Amino acid sequence: MDTRTLPLLCILCLAQLQLHGGDGVAAISGGTNDGSERWGYVQVRPKAHLFWWYYRSPQRVSSLAKPWPTILWLQGGPGASGVGLGNFLEVGPLDGDLKPRGSTWLHKADLIFVDNPVGTGYSYVEDDALLVTTDGEAAADLAALLRALAAGELPSLRDSPLFLVAESYGGKYAATLGVSLARAIRAGELKLTLGGVALGDSWISPEDFALSYGPLLQQVSRLDSNGADSASKKAQVVKQHIASGQWKLAQYALSSMLTAIVANSGHVDVYNFLLDTGMDPVAAGGAPARSFPPAYSVYLDSKLSVGDSIRSIMNGAIKEKLKIIPKDVVWEEQSYTVYNALINDFMKPRIQEVDELLSYGVNVTVYNGQLDVICSTVGAEAWVQKLKWDGLKNFLSLPRQPLHCGSSEVTKGFVRSYKNLHFYWILGAGHFVPVDQPCIALNMIAYDKCSATIKTNSKEL
């Protein structure tokens, strides 16, 4: 594979549960005296350490009729840092200049960020052989993290409805972890309120996204008919490799396809088709992929106001604040080592996992930015139509409802809901919905707090 194409793919980038800490799980933690923040490491496997950061909402009220929710944010990549990107650049209490964020999701829930999988951000392994190679292995590590936190540092998890909210490749983690938790709850092995799973611009079906690129970019004039035809032919190659289970070849074909699309479209930003990337994907010649600025962070860094870059902050002021980060752990937005370790799972769909969640009665929300390319709304609509869930026909037949923010009468999006499936179309947003449309994203989270719990035979677990 030509390493010059790799950066283009590093973009993908809630009934009470008694969680039992796993044998041999070790933890090291820190936090504030007032209990508003806690952070630390959990050794999820011998020599494999996940870093987490928890924020308690100042709006948390324990006397509410419904328990206050907790959101576990799962970043994409694979290998992109949730503690850095999701926290400081998207929904955490402070922005990239370490100033208060008015649209923080702490207004509606407690927040947990994690550098997942191990090897990402502040998380680390003592041997690269311990890196996860499948979404299932990543889910097992996350489940171990939740068990340890509920048994120790965060006992509120035992009675707080837990929402898994994901972005990009994080959607594959969320679907896989959600199924793992749901199965354990139904089997009586865990007692947890799994409030729901929210899939934001999520890489659930690589095939459906690949097939959408040519037609979408032609419709918005970023490709002409020749460019769109070429992209569609390349997408068929991707589809064929997926059908035959040749996952690496499918990834390579997708990489080649994206390289051609960027070149033929005037360097369209694959996160937002109204923008250019501002970087030439082939300019560095034969330089190794790790020499490129990670594409996942380029767009988000452009949203920062004047101040230090996120990398400087995470390796400077934040590392000093936390005090427990090993000296030899250098924070990066994107870990190519983690990305490469998951190469055989990258192109595998997770539609079946979403179907299983729906069948259990778990609340599933799909939300997508109108302007996204890499995880396009057209692609998300396509994979949703492949669901075998018995409520799909009724869901698809319902009209959408317009969404607004505050006193404005301007339509900001649409939503369609039936039973435990919800789909949000977010207008004017690209891949990073909370960044582009913070008001509507916050409203969406508030709406989805009231979601279904896991049920079996009409009896709540």
Image (cartoon, rainbow, N blue to C red):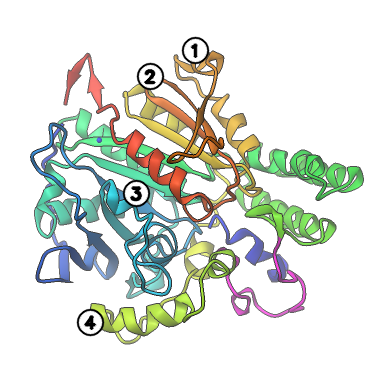
Secondary structure of the residue carrying tag 2 is loop
The relative height of residue 409 versus residue 268 in the rendered view (above or below) is: above
Three-letter code for the amino acid on which mark 3 is drawn: Ala
Whether the residues at callouts 2 and 1 have beta carbons within 8 Å, the answer is: yes
Residue 14, can we see it? yes
Give the residue at mark 4.
323
- Which of the 4 image quarters holds residue 315? bottom left
Residue 242 in sight in this render? no
**Residue under circle 1?**
394
- The residue that disc 2 covers is 419
- N-term-proximal mark, 4 vs 2: 4
Element class at badge 4:
loop
Task: Tell me the CA gap for discs 3 and 2.
Answer: 26 Å
Q: Report the span colored magenta.
A: 276-296
Answer with mark 4 or mark 3, whichever residue precedes in sequence.
Answer: 3
Q: Is residue 293 magenta?
A: yes
Judge left or right: residue 412 versus residue 52.
Answer: right
Residue at the location (14% across, 51% down)? 150
Instruction: Please name the amino acid that badge 2 sits on.
Output: Lys
Kind of element beneath mark 1:
helix
Q: Residue at x 91, y 46 (%)?
A: 226
Can you identify the residue that label 3 sits on?
139
Gap in angstroms between the C-alphas marked 4 and 1 = 53 Å
95 lies above or below 242: below
Q: Return the disc, 2 or 1, that comes first in the chain's sequence.
A: 1
Q: CA distance from mark 2 to mark 1?
A: 10 Å
* Residue 379 x/y as whole percent: 63, 37
Judged by depth in the image, the label closer to the viewer, 3 or 1, is 1
- For the residues labelled 3 and 1, say whether their Cβ atoms are less than 8 Å apart: no
Look at label 4 and name its amino acid: Lys
Q: Secondary structure at mark 3?
A: helix
